[in-house]
Image (cartoon, rainbow, N blue to C red):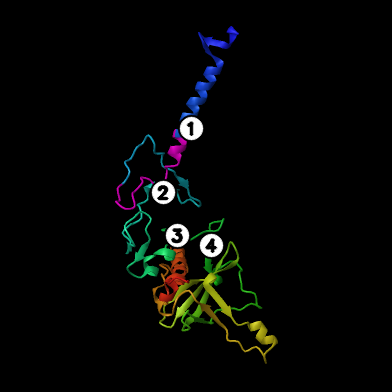
């Protein structure tokens, strides 16, 4: 029995317990620091007070190596988003909803909110721009039996013709249509996500049944009204769409399903 003691009455079981206890305390500190890497310091929603910086409990900065030689991204080194949004809280309490005071689709409120993504194009695995006009893609074409879309009229949510499809932007990684480039009646070119577009008409059916198929060929975009096409975020560089621009455009059209008309923001029941 005496062989179980290490020093005096200090035995192996007591040593194992102390080692486990020390490991458990260290694990708690480690997990707490890891959970506080990003999004800190904490800020109170109502008062705006910031929790003090405590290195004992805050983890080190997290860094992400970027592909294609774009360096390293450190989230904590990026300036915080501006919290002075064009809206007021419905009532003074943490978690109270924000009521827009301007144009919520332009200001990025609610379903029109967007992320400040990087201002460079999304890339394929081999470093090429992922989303490009179909003429600049690598052998991607619209099947001859499918609607070609270029030159088709575009009708908005209020039934007004806003222009024509001037180009198709395709995803070279997924091999599908991502955006329709629309030239409006005012001469402005805007991008519209393909997922909000509904294609009406079938040119193949018209060839097979010319006497019975006289359906008009057009693209319907019911997310926004005709007048709101003028405020669609524009591309900074022709022929290139950045990740930031993608988020802005998709958020604008997505927000239209709630804010395009006054009736859409009202309760259903």
> Is residue 209 visible to the viewer in this orientation of the structure?
yes
Task: Say whether residue 261 is visible.
Answer: no
Q: Which residue is mark 4?
A: 130
Using the image, tell me which numbered label, if any, was put on residue 75: 2
Residue at left offset 61%, top offset 69%: 140
First reached walking from the N terminus: tag 1 or tag 2 = 1
Locate residue 50, reporting x and y percent: 31, 46
Magenta stretch in the rendered image: 29-49
Q: Position of residue 227 (x, y in %)?
A: 40, 79
Which residue is found at the position 31% from the left and 59% from the top?
A: 84
Camera-side residue of 143 and 48: 48
Query: Are the two marked residues, 4 and 3, in contact with CB atoms closer than 8 angstroms?
Result: no
Chain-order first, disc 4 or disc 1: 1
Mark 2 vs 4, N-terminal side = 2
Q: Are marks 1 and 3 in contact (CB under 8 Å)?
A: no
- Residue receiving disc 3: 120
Check residue 27 in the rendering and tell me which mark sits there, or answer none: 1
Residue 209 figure quarter:
bottom right
Which comes sooner in the sequence, label 1 or label 3?
1
Q: CA distance from mark 4 to mark 1?
A: 43 Å
């Amino acid at each position: 029995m005496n062989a179980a003691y290490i020093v005096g009455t200090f035995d192996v079981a007591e040593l194992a317990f102390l080692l486990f206890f020390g490991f458990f305390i260290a694990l708690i500190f480690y997990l707490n620091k890891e959970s506080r890497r990003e999004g800190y310091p904490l800020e109170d929603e109502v008062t705006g007070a910031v929790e003090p910086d405590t290195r004992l409990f805050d983890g080190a900065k997290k860094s992400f190596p970027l592909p294609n030689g774009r360096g390293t991204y450190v989230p904590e080194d990026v300036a915080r988003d501006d919290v002075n949004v064009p809206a007021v809280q419905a009532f003074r309490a943490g978690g109270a909803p924000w009521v827009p005071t301007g144009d919520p689709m332009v200001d990025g409120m609610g379903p029109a909110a967007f992320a400040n993504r990087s201002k460079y194009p999304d890339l394929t695995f081999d470093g090429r721009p992922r989303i490009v006009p179909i003429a600049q893609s690598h052998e991607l074409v619209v099947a001859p039996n499918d609607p070609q879309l270029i030159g088709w009229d575009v009708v908005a949510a209020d039934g007004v013709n806003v222009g024509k499809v001037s180009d198709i932007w395709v995803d070279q990684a997924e091999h599908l249509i991502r955006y329709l480039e629309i030239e409006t009646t005012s001469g402005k070119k805007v991008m519209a996500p393909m997922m909000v577009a509904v294609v009406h008409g079938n040119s193949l059916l018209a060839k097979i049944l010319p006497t019975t198929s006289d359906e008009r060929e057009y693209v319907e975009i019911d997310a926004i009204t005709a007048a709101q096409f003028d405020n669609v975020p524009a591309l900074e560089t022709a022929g290139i769409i950045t990740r930031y621009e993608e988020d802005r455009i998709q958020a604008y059209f997505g927000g239209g399903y709630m804010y395009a008309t006054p009736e859409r923001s009202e309760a259903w029941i």
